[in-house]
Image (cartoon, coloured by chain):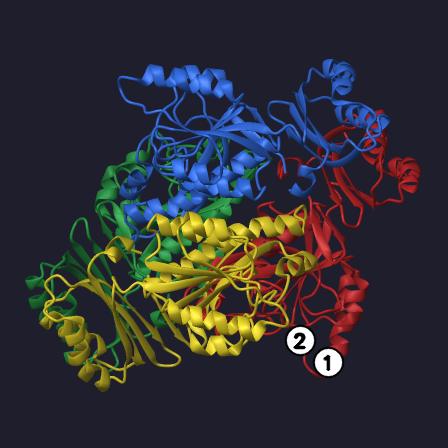
Chain colours: A blue, B green, C red, D yellow
């Protein structure tokens, strides 16, 4: 993945539509006519569903349309091919809220990467039901809101949370080991805009205590899964998974420790790909363009 | 795993018992008193269940007991520590029957390895509900019995099968992509002596068509699992698992193709470890000694 | 990799040229004008060298040019963009010679896959300096020529070999653990048409006895590398590599055993990608299109 | 690895000696006689060199010797078998100095783990030739000394460094991407007590700019290696290695980014195993006990 380009002045066009002849010819001719220098293009055809997917990235240098003008002029092609499409520039950074509970290893990993410019987004706020990560947030100068959650205040907590998300104009929620289930209401407000890290190789061991479940089943490999959050618990489109080998010597604590390192990298990759506009979702699956 | 020793004149002692002080001291003193030259030893303690497991391998050269004498003399120690134990020599080769259906990639892989002396066992017979692999069996000079299975003849087929297993004095059944479910009756006759390869990363996608299930769920990694067969479908103790990365580009056929290579190696390792007497089973899990 | 398409009636166009605006637009417009239904396209830009690479696959169904006509008409575009290009159909199978010495695990693996239609090529002849694999070749009905090689007959052996390659009209030589070095003369006749499997993670441990070298260095992971053969020993463009973890318990024999399984899969993938026309070579590197 | 035990009141005995009969019997009888409850034991035999290695861990609860008494009494056995041996308790924490230059991702990773009690050591001081990581060190309350290094002050810098190491009574130096070569003099003072992370899969790409070297060679997998520092550059005993797949799409920057995540985990594991007294060194290799 040629990340070097990402921080330059580029445009990214994402398309999905029914497959038919002429899509690539029309799009590439349109771009050529307006002086686009294509830096990267990737496409995918789902043969079974006859769906076509494409991601094109080009430089604004030499391109004779503004993004606004592009939106106007590209409509015709989009209509003709019945495209779902969106265009973003590499400067349209996602505005991110990170939710965390007591376990802050994913958060610490993300904040460090953020400071090192490994993440193409703005982390605007951290929301937690515990004070654990407050100092860490402070070190990286990210606003930290503690909103305790318990049986009695769930409704109120959620309302507070939604207000914060609105206030910070959030368009990506990252559940970085947030040990609470978001209500259907919150999920509804952020369709395909909430990324969770689940500490198992889904669909195995969904729900609570996956490392304990894995230990009891006696598996020889454990995993972690990042996915978009939908109404069904741990059932949303999978973005990334990774695994590590374990043995009979590993107890639950060892699984937890080994798993932490998986969780960090698997969540990081999901955020990176989402914020680089590499992901298209369909049929409860993801296309991740390289 | 120091396989070099396996084909020499060695003895392997496997022990499991409640953990208490003095086990290692007693066993190693006993072996020393009889001139054993220990080549390899490995042990494991399940702290939670307070169970101790051990595998010791020593050379018969210089050892002053026969296996028979050992069995007599070791009884005392075994009783004292309430041991489950067994002793085998590296020459006590497992007598193996391989069951296969139409897909013979695992069989082909195993037969080649067998010819190259990669497998520490005797493959005595191949049983199939199809004629597909007959020629292959012929090339490697292994008896091949075709026992068709359908709704009407299931009972008779099974009876024939059991007779064959008896005739060939089989003590390890390998289901090398055998697409039939063994009846509880057969399983009962061969407890912890039937190894199956399941073409998914269990417990995900148990049952039929795991690659199709995996494709539909949109996972990013697929796997294969070798396990001992028990009454519960795909629920027996897991011996080995391995995985391979896939992407949105991979269709079901690609998953099947990539999976085949996993199945071969994962089944091979299970057979290798079983026949090298490296596996102890407890709590529906395996200890695999290195 | 959508291998399902491979065995259909498709055309594959491979292009490399200096990068400039309009390449994709021109090519895709040309294909559209002639009714091409694009099944798969992948491209790559080497930013540093300003080189553009592309692979397009489309169906001959509905395409209004023959391959011959395409060659005529496409010339203009090719000239304009200074393209290196080639066009093949999925029916233009590579004509393969496999060279092998005493170790025939890679050969056995390839022959089985070949019979199962996992390989998109014709294996026309096996050439060996030993009789070891003769029976195996016979089982799969592939002509087998034994050409012994020693200090005195090297020139003659090579001449015989070249004649055989000519006789069988070979366009891909696979060195499947062929323990002899091909002379510069043979290599010169088959530029980028000889694939070797080296039993190490190149560039580490090039030359003789890589497993012994790896054992002595005390590495914790070993590998295998498939590459095109050039004049420099083990220095040609790398096609694929894979690795497996080892430990202090593994002796040289164990490395050899674990390595065999790597060698098989790494060589297989290289042949698969080569024969599916997925590989472009430049700067002593490979682009492997998915 | 049963890390749960590590933070309890345990003793670890490490032995290496020429192999002969009776070692295990003598040691385990001695431990039994003094009431040791063995929690973990692992052993290794280098068959070629006829060397025996062992690591035993037992609880001080119920053991009737102090560590001091053990040292006295065990001498006899040690002499008899010509053992190299050492005994440590799980409370004898390594006193660590971390050296870092401008790239502080390994440092950040280690400090976070340290705070979370993932590391069984005391990080006493951070030494750097740059001010980059000062704030980070401050956040975790670790003393930070900036000792600039250039052509003219190398001798003085080194002297300062050695004084600091002495002052903080350091017994493990971790080079966490310290881009300076330690002089033979420093190395001599800390034999097998300096751990470096090299950003390649050694022995490939030793020396400067390994990612650039890897990019130029066109490898398909990159790696990282943690090793003990010896006089020969990047030639010391390897402790751990890990790898990640790359493709033609990855430029040098991408290799650097992917490599960072390898470096972190590979260095962490080395420190973990060293400080848990799991490593024995011989023949420029490591035995890493599980």
**Towards the viewer: B163 or B76:** B76
Chain label for disc 2: C
Mark 2 and mark 1: Cα distance apart in space? 8 Å
Q: Position of residue C148 (x, y in %)?
A: 67, 75
Q: Residue at x 47, y 34 (%)?
A: A226
User: Which residue is label 2 attached to?
Assistant: C148
Label placed on residue C153 = 1
Image quadrant where residue A273 sits: top right
From where the camera sits, is residue D141 visible?
yes
| Badge 2 vs badge 1, beta-carbon distance below 8 Å | yes
Image quadrant where residue C99 sits: bottom right
Q: Position of residue C27 (x, y in %)?
A: 83, 33
Is A64 situated left or right of B159 in this image?
right
Is A101 situated left or right of C253 in this image?
left
Chain label for disc 1: C
Quadrant where the image shows the N terminus of chain C = top right
From where the camera sits, is residue A200 visible?
no
**Towards the viewer: B242 or B67:** B242
Instruction: Describe the element under mark 1 as helix, strand or loop.
Output: loop
Q: Residues within 10 Å of mark 1 (few under 14, many from 20)?
A: few
Q: Position of residue B49 (x, y in %)?
A: 17, 49
**Towards the viewer: B190 or D124:** D124
Q: Residues within 10 Å of mark 2 (few under 14, many from 20)?
A: some
């Amino acid at each position: 993945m040629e990340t070097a380009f990402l921080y330059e002045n580029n445009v990214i066009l994402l398309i999905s539509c029914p497959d038919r002849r002429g899509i690539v010819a029309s799009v590439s001719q349109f771009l050529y006519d307006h002086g686009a220098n294509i830096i990267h293009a990737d496409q995918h055809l789902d043969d079974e569903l006859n769906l076509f997917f494409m991601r094109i990235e080009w430089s604004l240098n030499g391109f004779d349309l503004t993004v606004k003008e592009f939106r106007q002029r590209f409509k015709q092609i989009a209509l003709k091919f019945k495209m779902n499409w969106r265009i973003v520039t590499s400067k349209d950074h996602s505005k991110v809220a990170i939710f965390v509970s007591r376990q802050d290893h994913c958060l610490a990993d993300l904040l460090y990467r953020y400071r090192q410019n490994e993440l193409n987004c703005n982390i605007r706020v951290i929301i937690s039901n515990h004070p654990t990560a407050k100092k860490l947030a402070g070190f990286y100068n990210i606003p930290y809101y503690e909103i305790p959650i318990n049986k009695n205040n769930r409704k109120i907590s959620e309302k507070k949370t939604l207000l914060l998300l609105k206030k910070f104009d959030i368009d990506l929620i990252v559940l970085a080991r947030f040990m609470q289930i978001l209500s259907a209401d919150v999920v509804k407000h952020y369709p395909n805009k909430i990324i969770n890290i689940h500490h198992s190789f889904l669909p195995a061991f969904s729900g609570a205590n996956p490392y304990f479940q894995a230990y009891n089943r006696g598996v020889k490999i454990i995993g972690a899964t990042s996915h978009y959050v939908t109404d069904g618990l741990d059932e949303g489109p999978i973005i990334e998974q990774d695994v590590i080998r374990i043995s009979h010597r590993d107890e639950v604590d060892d699984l937890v420790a080994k798993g932490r390192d998986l969780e960090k990298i698997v969540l990081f990759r999901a955020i990176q790909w989402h914020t680089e506009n590499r992901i298209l979702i369909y049929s409860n699956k993801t296309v991740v363009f390289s």
